[in-house]
Image (spheres, grey):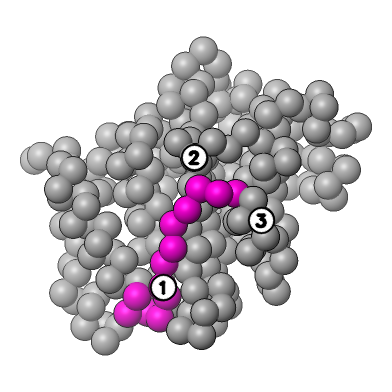
Amino acid sequence: MRNEITVKELAMRILAIDDLVHKFGLQIAIGNNFEEYVRNTGILPGKPPITPHFRPDCSDLPPEKAFWIIGRDREGRIAHVQAMRLDDLSHTSLSEHLVSLKASFAAPDLKAGPGSSCSCSAPTARTLKGLVAYHGDVWLREDFRGRGLASFVGRLAFGLAWAKWSPDLIYALVAGWNIEKGVVDRYGYQHREYGSVLHLPALGIRHDDWLVWITRDELSKILSSTFTLRTRRESVS
């Protein structure tokens, strides 16, 4: 069975997913200006604050290595956000990247603040290397939850990451309830291990998370698999 996906097939898939998301009442915008992203999404009712990973005052986010997705409802109000960034970990592991705080800050010694730390006990993180995309700041407004949107917006982000970077893996750091409620499954992640604990006192952040990830081959398989688009269109029409 062929697992690869061509550029044409990927473009058609992204357009089809965007069309489905639109039927749910979301108008999608994609960009790479993170100053604009922070202005628009920094304070949204019910959404946690943006972590340093996607704040331009903390991280280096050049247009070719980071992008965001914003979904607005029919009244133009923001109802969904997510973002991705690419890091070259060819010469280090994901575990070392997290513990060094370079996953969160371009210059940890200058930006992290006193008492900052990150631990990573996920065993496989010590072996994960290469071109690694981080997927974070994912939020869906409460009135859009429970309608099957997660699988669509997740694959939209995965498809864009593949088109831009073809990364060796995509990973996220998620709270335990995302595992318990199957949210990471709906987004498409294939692996999970506990844990990563990030403590940034200066920013009021203490996250006790699971590491979830999907490899390049698994991502290709998901993106090249056949979606039952007709059935899903009928379910939201």
Residue at the limit of the structure toward the top, as seen here: 91
Measure how far apart labels 3 and 2 are at the Cα level.
15 Å
Residue type at numbered disc 2: Pro
Residue type at numbered disc 3: Val
State if disc 2 and disc 3 touch (CB < 8 Å): no
Q: Is 206 part of what is drawn in magenta?
A: no
Mark 1 or mark 3, which is nearer the start of the sequence?
1
Mark 1 or mark 2, which is nearer the start of the sequence?
1
Quadrant holding the N terminus:
top left
Q: Is residue 214 above or below residue 22?
A: above
Using the image as rendered, state which of residue 116 and residue 10 is in the foreground. Answer: 10
For mark 2, what is the residue? 63
Label 3: few (<14), some (14–19) or many (≥20) C-alpha neighbours in 10 Å: some
Residue depicted at 50% across the width and 48% down the height: 32
Depth-wise, is mark 2 or mark 1 nearer the camera? 2
The region drawn magenta spans 22-34
For mark 1, what is the residue? 27
Left-right relation of 94 to 161: right
Q: Position of residue 101 (x, y in %)?
A: 71, 29
For mark 3, what is the residue? 38
Secondary structure found at label 2: helix
Residue at the limit of the structure toward the right, as seen here: 114
Left-right relation of 119 to 173: right
Q: Position of residue 26 (x, y in %)?
A: 42, 75
Residue 174 in view of the camera: no
